[in-house]
Image (spheres, rainbow, N blue to C red):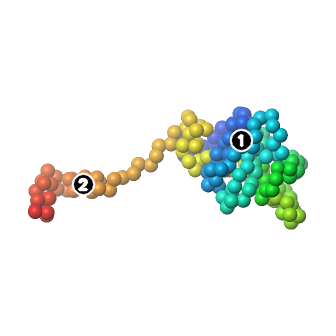
């Protein structure tokens, strides 16, 4: 049976589900329970699907793109332009269900560096594997999105019971005599 890290989890079919999974994953990774979805379907969102504090308290936003192919640099630039109207941000993350793409990552790093040098917010990418890694941090959250996957909690050993079992095994049925001998 493959381990959870070796499994390839199916990507969500609906964009709403992808947004929820992204919010939950990043709330776990950033230890930020205050991440929230921006608005509801049909409302103007100014290029932001999720917003809130990141792991060090900076105000960040996430724009989700459920797609097979990685987003283009043009699309990322367009989303950054839309997010300018959202309000002050430290960073905009573009989350995608696509697989990692080294060329796009390099392009976004370069664009982000230029933006930060000009006093704008940074840009970064979240790929499907990053989101799954966040969900795996909490078995209950993972099970909420993938109920068909059950993770049994690690069994904890009660040390006193184990010691008692060892003593019983060593001294056998004469345990009471041993206790009387030692403790009087």
Label count reads 2
Number of residues whose C-alpha sits closer than 10 Å to that of mark 2, classed few (under 14), some (14–19) or many (20 or more): few
On the image, numbered disc 2 is attached to which residue? 164
- Asked whether residue 120 appears in the rendered view, the answer is yes
Above-or-below relation of 13 to 184: above
Residue 3's mark?
none
Residue 128 coordinates in the image, percent (x, y): 70, 46
Q: Is residue 151 left or right of residue 58?
A: left
Q: Nearer the viewer, residue 160 or 170?
A: 160
Question: Is residue 105 shown to the viewer in this render?
Answer: no
Q: Position of residue 90 (x, y in %)?
A: 77, 59
Which residue sits at x=50%, y=42%?
Answer: 151
Quick check: marks 1 and 2 in contact, CB under 8 Å? no
Residue underneath mark 1: 19
Estimate the x, y position of residue 52 in percent, counting from the top left.
Answer: 71, 52
Left or right position of 181 against 5? left
- At x 80% / y 34%, what residue is drawn? 42
- Disc 2 is placed on an element classified as helix
Quarter of the image with the C terminus is bottom left
Mark 1 to mark 2: distance in Å? 51 Å
- Are there few (<14), some (14-19), or many (20+) residues within 10 Å of tag 1? many
Q: Earlier in the sequence, mark 1 or mark 2?
A: 1
Compared across the picture, whether 46 is left or right of 20 comes to right
Which residue is at the front of the view, 175 or 16? 16
Q: Judge whether 43 appears above or below 158 on screen.
A: above
Along the viewing direction, whichever of 7 and 63 lies nearer the viewer: 63
Q: Name the image quarter holding residue 143.
A: top right
Label 1, secondary structure: give it.
helix
Q: Residue at x 82, y 58 (%)?
A: 121
Q: Nearer the viewer, mark 1 or mark 2?
A: 1
The quadrant holding residue 102 is bottom right
């Amino acid at each position: 049976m493959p381990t959870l890290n070796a499994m390839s989890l199916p990507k969500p079919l609906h964009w709403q589900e992808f947004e929820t999974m992204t919010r939950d994953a990043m709330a776990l990774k950033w230890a930020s329970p205050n991440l929230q979805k921006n608005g509801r379907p049909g409302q103007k969102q100014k290029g932001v699907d999720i917003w809130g504090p990141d792991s060090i308290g900076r105000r960040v936003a996430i724009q989700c793109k459920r797609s097979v192919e990685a987003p283009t640099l043009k699309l990322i630039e367009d989303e950054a332009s839309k997010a300018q109207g959202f309000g002050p941000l430290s960073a905009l993350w573009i989350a995608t269900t696509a697989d990692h793409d080294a060329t796009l990552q390099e392009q976004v790093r370069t664009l982000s560096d230029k933006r930060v040098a000009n006093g704008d917010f940074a840009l970064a990418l979240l790929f499907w594997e990053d989101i799954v890694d966040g969900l795996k941090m909490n078995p209950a959250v993972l099970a909420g999105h993938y109920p068909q996957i059950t993770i049994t909690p690690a069994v904890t050993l009660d040390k006193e019971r184990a010691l008692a079992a060892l003593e019983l095994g060593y001294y056998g049925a004469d345990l009471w005599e041993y206790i009387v001998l030692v403790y009087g």
